[in-house]
Image (tube, rainbow, N blue to C red):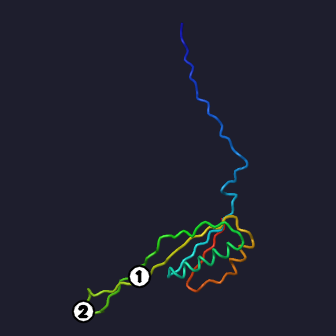
Amino acid sequence: MTETKIKKTPVRAKKAVSAKAPKMEDIGKLRIRVRAYENKVLDASVKQIIDTAMRYDARIVGPVPLPTEIKKYTVNRSTFVHKNAREQFEMRVHKRVLDIVNPTPKIVEALTTLSLPSGVNVDVKMS
């Protein structure tokens, strides 16, 4: 008598999907990236942004300090004889990131009317 072998395939359980849990795509987020040459001016500007957002009961994540961008420049001191005499200069760009979760139109309007010191660059991205 010949025996036939039956190959059994494993049965996979279906994943339970809950409709109540919010997805990350559904939650609106306002990402504010602040850049400046001086860290004290930058921190004061970030504090001013946080105070404005807290007045409207916003949920804030941050500020998160990003790595400082350092640009170095080397120039010759002399043009003719002393070729090895050089000077080095550097520019440091300090950066911070803030996230405001579920911003309301009042928060966005308050942040757009906010006056920050000169030398502070603010990039706002909605996601």
SS at badge 1: strand
Q: Residue at x 68, y 54 (%)?
A: 23
Q: Residues within 10 Å of mark 1 (few under 14, many from 20)?
A: few
* Residue 38 against residue 29 in the figure, above or below: below
* Mark 2 lies on residue: 81
Number of residue marks:
2
SS at badge 2: loop
Measure how far apart labels 1 and 2 are at the Cα level.
Answer: 25 Å
* Residue 10 against residue 117 in the figure, above or below: above
| Type of the residue with mark 2 | Val
Q: Position of residue 100 (x, y in %)?
A: 65, 67
Q: Quadrant of residue 88?
A: bottom left
The disc, 1 or 2, on the residue closer to the chain's N-terminal end is 2
Q: Residue at x 58, y 73 (%)?
A: 33
Query: Quick one: 89 or 108, which is closer to the camera?
Result: 108
Marks 2 and 1: in contact by CB < 8 Å?
no
Position of 43 with respect to 106 (left or right) is: left
* Mark 1 lies on residue: 90
